[in-house]
Image: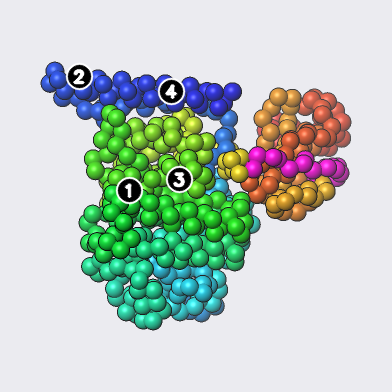
Amino acid sequence: MRRASCASNRAHLTHILQNISSHTIHLRHVNYNIRLTHLLCCLILCCCSLKTFATPREYRAVWLTTYLGLDWPKKPATTPAGVERQKEELRQMLDRYVAANLNTVFVQARMRSTTAYRSMYEPWDEAFTGTPEKEPLYDPLAFAVEECHKRGLECHAWVVAFPICKVPTEKKLGKRSLPKKRPELCQRCGDLWMMDPGVPGTAEYLAAICKEIVQNYDVDGIHLDYIRYPEKEVRFNDAKTYSKYGKKQNKAAWRRANVTRCVKAIHTAIKSVRPWVRLSCAPIGKHADLPRQSSYGWNAYSAVSQEAQEWLRTGLMDALFPMMYFDGKHFYPFAVDWQENCYGRPVVPGLGIYFLNRQQRDWSLEVVQRQMNVVRNIGMGGQAFFRSEFLLNNEKGLYDWVQRYFYKEPAMTPAMTWADNTPPAAPNVRIKLGHRTLVMEWDAVADATPIYYNVYRIDSPGAAPKRLAHKLHTTSCRYSPALPVLMHSQYAVTAVDAYGNESALIPIGASFSATEAAIRIDEKVKKASVCLWGKK
C-alpha cells in the first residue's frame, strides 16, 4: 500500500513540475515576471499536505568530517589524556546522533591520500596528532566503528577518491606521498595534486585502498566522495593521458568510462570480501539537464563525468547520496529526477544544512523542513546532513525539530533486497516474568551472514510495534517498563541479516486489555500505576 501511495505521489508531483515549467514558458511569452521558484510554492504546499506515513525504512545520515578536524577531532593529541579527550568528544557526538534517531554515520577515513586508519598504502593524516604521517596512540577508524556499533549506528568509511594533498603537505610527507610513490597516477594542478582517472592503474589503486578497509574494519559501507573529474576551475590537463589511452574516442564519453572503471573496480574488490558491505557515493546534486529545467552548467553527467544513475541501473552502487546543496528550482525538479531513475535503490539527498548558518546563506529553517518533507513524501531513501557540526550546533533549531518531530521514532536503513531478499528465520523466544522485569531469551539464528536482533512491544491488536532495542548481538534482553501494565503486552524478537532483511515478527506473551491487566496485579502495584498517571 505504501509503495503504491509513493508511486502515486511521485506521479502527482511530476505532473505539478511539468505544469510549473510549461506555465513558466507561457508566462515569459506574455511578459509576466514570475519566476519558477515562486511557482514551486505550489509543489511545496501540496507535499506538506500529503499524509505522513508510519516510520519508513530510510537513511538518516550525517557526514562526519575529519579533514582538518572540521567536525572531529577538534584538537590533535599526542598523550593518553589527549587521546581520551578525542575519544570522549566522538562518544558525545554519537550519543547525540542516537538521541535524534539518526542511523548512519559517514566517517571520513581517507582524506587527501592520507588516512584515519593504519594503511599499508598511505600515511596517517595529521588531524589526529598534528603531524603528517605520525601514528596516533589509537586507531581512530576502529574506535569509530566500535562506538557506532555499540549504539546501533551504521558506520560507513568515507573515502575521498581523486583529490590528493596540496603541494606543501606533499613536501612534508616526502617519499611517503602518493606523487612520489606513484607519480604515474598523479597530476599537479597548481598548488594541489589530483589522481588521474584516465590512467588504468588509478582504478586498481583505489580498489586496493577500499578492499584494505573492508578486510581490516567492520564497516557497514564504503562511501565514495569526489569520484569524478575536477570542476573547470581546477587546472587539470589530461591531454597526454587522452593521447595515450583515449584511442580517438569521444573525450567526454572516455572520461565517463574512466570514472566508471574506477567504480567497478572498487565494487568488485569490496564485494569479494563481504558482499553485504554497501557501496555508495556522493555525486553532484543534479544528474543532468532536464527537459524543462537546466542545470546551468553544473551537473554530474556532463560537467564532471559521473554517470551515477547508470551505476544504479547496472548494480555498481547500492545507494546514492547526491549533494543537493541547493533550493527552489535547483532542488525540487532534480529530486524528482533522481527518484524516477533510482532503479529500486535508495537515492538520499544530501542537504546543505551549513547554509542555515548566518555566515553562509542564512537560510531559514523552513527551507530545510520543506526539503525533508518533500523527499520523504515522494518516496526517496532518506536524508543526509552536511555536515555534523551544523546539525549538532542546532543551526536555526534544526536538531531540535528533527529530534522532536521528524525523526520522533527510530528507523532501520533500507534492506539490500537487490542482493538478497530472503529473511532469516524468526528466533525461538522465551519470556520470563520477574518483579517488574521481563527477561527475554532466544536461540541464535544460523545464517550465512552476521545476524543481529530487534526487540518490539505490541500494546494492543493492530497497534504498530514499538521498537525497544535494536541491533543486539546477544541472545537475551531485560526490559523494565515504566508502567507495570505493560508487563502484559505482547513482545517479539526479530532477526536481521547483514543485507537488512528482517524475519517475521511473531508476538508472544499474555495478551490482556489494560483493565484485565490491572486486575491481575496486586494492590500495591495498582496504586503505583495510578500515581504514574498523575491521579490522586
Q: Which residues are magenta?
A: 420-441
Q: Residue at point 32% right, 23% down?
A: 18
Tell me how far mark 1 sits from mark 4, CA to CA: 32 Å
| Residue bearing the label numbered 2 | 26
Circles 1 and 4 in contact, beta carbons < 8 Å: no
Instruction: Tell me the amino acid under the disc marked 1.
Output: Ala
Mark nearer the N terminus (1 vs 4)? 4
Q: Residues within 10 Å of mark 3 (few under 14, many from 20)?
A: many
Q: Image quadrant of residue 375?
A: top left
| Residue bearing the label numbered 1 | 253
Q: For this rendering, which residue is in front, 288 or 25?
A: 288
Mark number, residue 399: none
Tell me how far mark 3 sits from mark 4, CA to CA: 24 Å
Instruction: Tell me the amino acid under the disc marked 4.
Output: Ala
Q: Residues within 10 Å of mark 4 (few under 14, many from 20)?
A: some
Q: In the structure shown, which secondary structural element does the residue marked by tag 2 occupy?
A: helix
Instruction: Tell me the amino acid under the disc marked 3.
Output: Trp
